[in-house]
Amino acid sequence: MNHFVTVLKKELIDILRDKKTIILGILLPILLYPLMTFGLSKLAESSMSTSNKTFTVTIKDEGKSSVRDLLNQQQQIKIKIKDFSDAEKSLKDGETSLIIEVPKAFDESVSKEQQAKIKLTYDDKSQDSSMLKSTVSNMLSEYSQQLAVKRLQAKNIDASILKPFNVENKNISEIKSGNDAQTGMVQGILMMLPSILVILILAPTMGIAVDLCAGEKERGTIEPLLSTAVSRISIVWAKIVALAIIGIITLSCTLAAMGISFKMMLNGSEIAFVNAKFLLPIGIVCLFLILTVGALQIALSIYARSIKEANSYLSGVYMVAMILSYVPFAFDAKSIAIKYFHIPIMNTVCLMKELMAGIFRLDHFVIVILWNMVYTALAVLFARYMFSKEEVVFRS
């Protein structure tokens, strides 16, 4: 035990001397979450806002109908009406955002209580075009409703006949804010958050694992360490635990920054998952994840002949981890299939998605913990095996 502690202290001192560890493990999460929550929120608000934009609209309206007057008089958005010889080409080129085609006899058809048709042509590859189409479509629907009401009133019919029932919406989500756009942005971030959290936890450990084994090979310090009275299993555990400690520091800073950022963003509103019921289970499953990936990284790093070769191996591990963490990205937290809770990394992300939705399933939690314990044991045994092979440790 004393030997293990001695090697662990030595590894932690070496790790913390590296400024990259402090930057990636501690400073990056603290800076990233405020930037992500506030920065992305502001970008989304500015891109989705219509108040400071002037949209170009092309109207094909030979009859100079009331639709043109309706667009000129409305106050919802700023519209600039401009005619083009080839309207569809202008729409593809982005010179106009929407083409409105109004039949020549539109006003006459309306006055005769006949049905008229207005055609909206837009480009769904353009955010402005799609947004403008939706706004103008709602505007025309309201105008259509007003005309229908006038027709009924002219016939002395109660206009309420057009509304057989009303629909009342009630949201039971615990993530609420006065700003709907901001709340929607938070919901979007929450979809990505479990995947980002896993990647951020594992990112700093890759470089450290390379230095702990392949780096020592290149510096020639691995031989003196192995020649001491310290057993190889103690060395393996010391390196894995040192890696895990950095991962835990990263996890703690990440969760703290995440909670503070969201609470500030939502003006102090309570968020379902920023509490001990969420943080404790996530901390436990992430600890096993860190140990599993850390042991695998240590095993591959000791197998590598050089730092360059180790980076190649661990980049592959990191890529696989990234893919597995992003597979559940679009899963509905309330209907995740049980099979995904058996797959490494993916099961941790799925469990986080459930907890962020306010769902705590004991059976899912136990499955994830048991599998992560199995994966950790296998990874540690693999690392121990690699350290026990002389042809691997002294491979050059």
Image: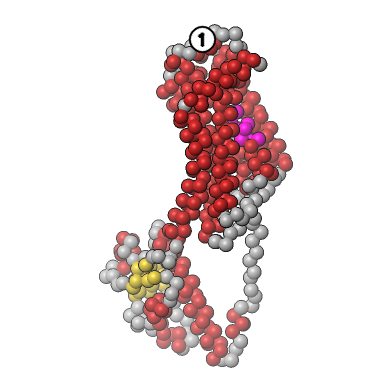
Q: Position of residue 251 (x, y in %)?
A: 58, 36
Magenta-drawn stretch, dominant element (helix, strand or loop): helix
Indicate yes or no whether the magenta region holds residue 256.
no
Image quadrant holding the C terminus, namely top left
Above or below 115: residue 354: above
Image quadrant holding the N terminus, namely top right
Q: Position of residue 328 (x, y in %)?
A: 57, 44
Q: Position of residue 19 (x, y in %)?
A: 46, 29
Question: Which residue is painted at 54% across and 91% down in the image?
Answer: 154
Which segment did they paint magenta? 284-293
Question: Which residue is painted at 66% across and 46% down in the image?
Answer: 275
Amino acid type indicated by mark 1: Pro
Q: How many marks?
A: 1
Mark 1 nearby-residue class (10 Å; few <14, some 14–19, many ≥20): few
- Nearest the eye: 252 or 362: 252
- Nearest the eye: 85 or 372: 372
Q: How is the image coloured?
A: secondary structure
Residue extending farthest to the left is: 85
**343 left or right of 115?**
right
Above or below 324: residue 122: below
Is residue 179 shown to the viewer in this render?
yes
**358 left or right of 301?**
right
Is residue 319 shown to the viewer in this render?
no
Q: Secondary structure at mark 1?
A: helix
Question: Which residue is painted at 49% across and 30% down in the image?
Answer: 21
**46 left or right of 276?**
left
Which residue does the numbered mark 1 point to in the structure image? 224
Q: Position of residue 214 (x, y in %)?
A: 47, 19
Question: Which residue is painted at 62% across and 27% down in the image?
Answer: 376
